[in-house]
Image (spheres, rainbow, N blue to C red):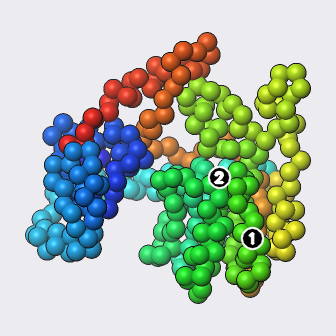
């Protein structure tokens, strides 16, 4: 529907790669952009025809008054409702427990959502979780969603969760973090213990850098160097089957944090739900450690991200990725319009 839009009103957006699918999502040749931003640079960004330098709330209130008599036609409204209903069905399906010993991240998100309260705040920042939460998490309360996107700030999650809990001491704060991001800044758990600040950390262990692995696969690099594996002394790569003996649950426990370990069984999702309930009933920080399969993905969107592919390679997957890249690159608009 964004691709067909003839008028796009942007409020407070910088129209980054993620927002615009690297300037490919808006395909109507005559699309007009009304861009509202308090910063002039961002208001004019990408050649917006109607830049408005204004506070977001003031502009929304003025627009609401000016457009009070305007409504889209019934067919367009029905199409929006149908698309939303279809997506809700996909999300419901993604949340269904698979019974696998290593559940996918969508199942884990669904279990956390179901076990949480509407006023709880989910905190996240990096890896594959921001994209999956954006697609799957159903925000039920205005302050219930605290996720950083633009810079993929690995390590923000636990420190950010402490800040959110300080700002909202009457809410449970659920920090969702992958093992890669956890390794960047887990020591802030010491702060949580020392200062008696309660947060709930759901640590998803997938034995590698899941999002970077998936991204490298899409550009034909076959998940190079994204697994937690011992180096092969002959090939000098890290693609073998011997997993590093890193125990992140033991690491968290060493800081004085209560830890709930969920063993890889067909009952993992039910145990995760019970663990969330236990953590919510506690007065202290709890870390829930669950293993997952990084190759089980959330429902896909249609967006494209401009990540260049090697132009010279003997690897067939890279050659194929380059062909696909050039097709998508041709859809880019030099300016949004």
Instruction: Examine the image and state in which quarter residue 28 appears.
Output: top left
Judging by the rendered image, the residue that carries numbered circle 1 is: 189
Q: Residue at x 53, y 22 (%)?
A: 310
- Nearer to me, 50 or 175: 50
Q: Residues within 10 Å of mark 1 (few under 14, many from 20)?
A: many
Residue 77 placement: quadrant: bottom left
Task: Estimate the x, y position of residue 145 in percent, counting from the top left.
Answer: 51, 69
User: Residue at label 2?
Assistant: 105
Question: Residue 159: image x %, image y %?
Answer: 64, 68
- First in sequence: mark 1 or mark 2? 2
The quadrant of the rendering that contains the C terminus is: top left
> Regarding mark 2 in the picture, which secondary structure is present there?
helix
Q: Residue at coordinates 53% horizontally, 77% vertically from top-left? A: 118
Of residues 85 and 50, which is closer to you in this image?
50
Q: Nearer the viewer, mark 1 or mark 2?
A: 1
Is 84 rendered above or below residue 138?
Answer: above
Q: Quadrant of residue 64?
A: bottom left
């Amino acid at each position: 529907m964004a691709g067909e839009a003839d008028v796009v009103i942007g409020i407070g957006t910088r129209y980054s790669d993620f927002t615009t699918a690297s300037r490919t999502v808006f395909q109507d040749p005559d699309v007009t952009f009304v861009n509202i931003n308090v910063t002039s640079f961002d208001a004019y960004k990408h050649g917006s025809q109607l830049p408005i330098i204004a506070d977001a709330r003031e502009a929304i209130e003025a627009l609401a008054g000016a457009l009070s008599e305007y409504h889209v036609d019934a067919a367009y409204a029905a199409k929006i409702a149908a698309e939303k209903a279809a997506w809700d069905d996909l999300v419901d399906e993604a949340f269904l427990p698979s019974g696998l010993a290593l559940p996918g991240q969508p199942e884990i998100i669904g279990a956390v959502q179901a076990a949480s309260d509407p006023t709880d705040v989910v905190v996240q920042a990096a890896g594959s979780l921001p994209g999956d939460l954006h697609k799957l998490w159903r925000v039920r309360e205005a302050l219930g969603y605290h996720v950083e996107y633009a810079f993929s700030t690995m390590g923000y999650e636990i420190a950010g969760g402490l800040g959110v809990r300080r700002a909202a001491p009457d809410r449970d704060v659920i920090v969702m973090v992958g093992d890669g991001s956890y390794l960047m800044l887990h020591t802030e758990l010491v702060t949580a213990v020392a200062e008696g600040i309660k947060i709930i950390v759901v640590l998803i262990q997938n034995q590698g850098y899941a999002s970077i692995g998936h991204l490298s696969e899409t550009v034909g690099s076959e998940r190079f160097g994204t697994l937690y594996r011992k180096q092969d002394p002959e090939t000098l790569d890290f693609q073998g089957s011997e997993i590093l003996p890193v125990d992140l649950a033991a690491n968290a426990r060493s800081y004085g944090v209560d830890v709930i370990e969920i063993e890889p069984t067909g009952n993992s999702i039910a145990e995760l739900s019970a663990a969330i309930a236990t953590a919510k009933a506690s007065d202290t920080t709890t870390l829930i450690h669950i293993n997952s399969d990084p190759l089980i993905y959330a429902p896909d969107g249609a967006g494209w991200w401009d990540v260049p592919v090697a132009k010279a390679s003997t690897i067939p997957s890279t050659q194929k990725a380059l062909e696909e890249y050039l097709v998508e690159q041709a859809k880019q608009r030099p300016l949004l319009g």
